[in-house]
Amino acid sequence: MKRHENGPACALRALPVVVAAAFSGACLASGFQILEQNGSGLGNAYAGTAAVAQDASTVFFNPAGMALLPQGRSFAVGVDAIQPSAKFENNGSVPATVVGVPALTRPLGDSGGDAGSLAWVPHGYFAISLGPNLSVGFGVSAPFGLKTEYSPEWAGRFLAVKSEIVTVNLNPSIAYKVNDKLSLGLGANYQRIDAELTNKVNLGASETNAIIDADDTAWGYNLGAIYQPSPSMRIGVSYRSEIDYHLSGSIKSPAPVPLLNQSVNSNIKLPDTFTLSAVQQLSDRWEMLGDLSWTGWAKIPELRILTSTGATLAVTDEKWRNTWRVALGGNYKWSEQTKLRFGIAFDQSPVKDELRTPRLPDSNRLWIALGAQFKPAKQSAIDIGYTHIFVDDGSISDSGGVPAGAPPGTPTKGTLIGNYNNHVDILGIQYSQTF
């Protein structure tokens, strides 16, 4: 058994997963990060994000890029439709029971169906130049999120049924053009997270539903620089800080069990990210883009749930690892009005094979992306992108945390044993304009 939790309190271990381990097939970057913060980068698999500075969405990816936009005002608005697929294949799962009472065995249940759910991720940005060297901007985005749901009677229902997270990030920014080669940028991030998790709880003679609602707001920052060694080349670096959350909320159940009806809280740090990007103009028609990014997922060694009095209800070992992402893309200028995009990326998962859970059956993934930009007028553009993400198959063996040697009468969650087959399809569109 790879989870260590205390008695019935193990039913509550889903709470910290609200912010740290909740994507089934829907995770888009490694872990549960969402890279889809514009439509113009989707067709390049988000290669060159910290250097390209092609529209106002640079507010999110590298605020220094605002200093390189055309003088005046710029905005970009768009939405990504994200359709994940997460299918569990049972391979010897053990049903939930009560220790020492073989007669109290819960039905095993089905495989859960496709846990992926269609999600819409909107984003909007605005930038304005205050002079030849100074620009300010503002962005609204959703850096983290999920929407997954298994059938209510599936084999892993005591571990997870529904997981839904919504984040909103407000990002005021400023950029300064030092000279013709160097630009610097800085942004503040005010982020809110709202989450709902449901799962079944084994009460021994019966089972019941448990619903966790939790939320918090927190501050972070992002900064960056863009250096242009020549008119045909840009090198960009950007950094997004960790976000330190102190979630508070409640767990509720129709069952009259005090442990399942009380206030709960959890502290967790979401990871920081560092990105190095390059954009090289090869000719009048060809442009190449590259990205190397690092994410500090190792900030999540464990997930701990507390009551309002500070007592520990549950501890889940995660032991996540830091990850790397590498992306390569290209643009081909078909005509003055049309640009074609393509990209490929490899994304490493922070989840170790032996610690995979049904809330995050995450694995390494490969991105294949295509896109196009159409310019109906000189100062406006419509971007369309499509990405298919191939996710490596991942095995799972999760017992939910009943400690070895548990006394008779202790309810268990069963052991979910099998494999996940996941993939993600993303379609994005964006309109941008300068004026």
Image (cartoon, rainbow, N blue to C red):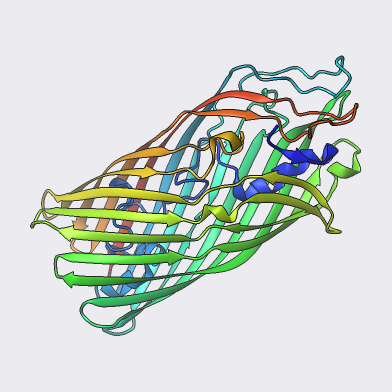
Identify the residue at image location x=30%, y=52%: 47
Identify the residue at image location x=34%, y=49%: 326
Q: Is residue 196 above or below residue 246?
A: above
Can residue 99 be seen at all in this image of the molecule? yes
Can residue 69 be seen at all in this image of the molecule? no
Nearest to the observer: residue 250 or residue 397: 397
> Percent position (x, y) of residue 308?
83, 58
> Percent position (x, y) of residue 52?
27, 61
Which residue is outermost to the top? 103
Would you identify the image quadrant in which residue 190 lies? bottom right
Which residue is outermost to the left? 284
Q: Which quadrant, please, contains the C terminus?
A: bottom left
> Percent position (x, y) of residue 168?
55, 58
Horizontal side, residue 112 vs residue 188: left or right: right
Horizontal side, residue 391 vs residue 56: left or right: right
Q: Which quadrant, please, contains the N terminus?
A: top right
Horizontal side, residue 232 vs residue 363: left or right: left
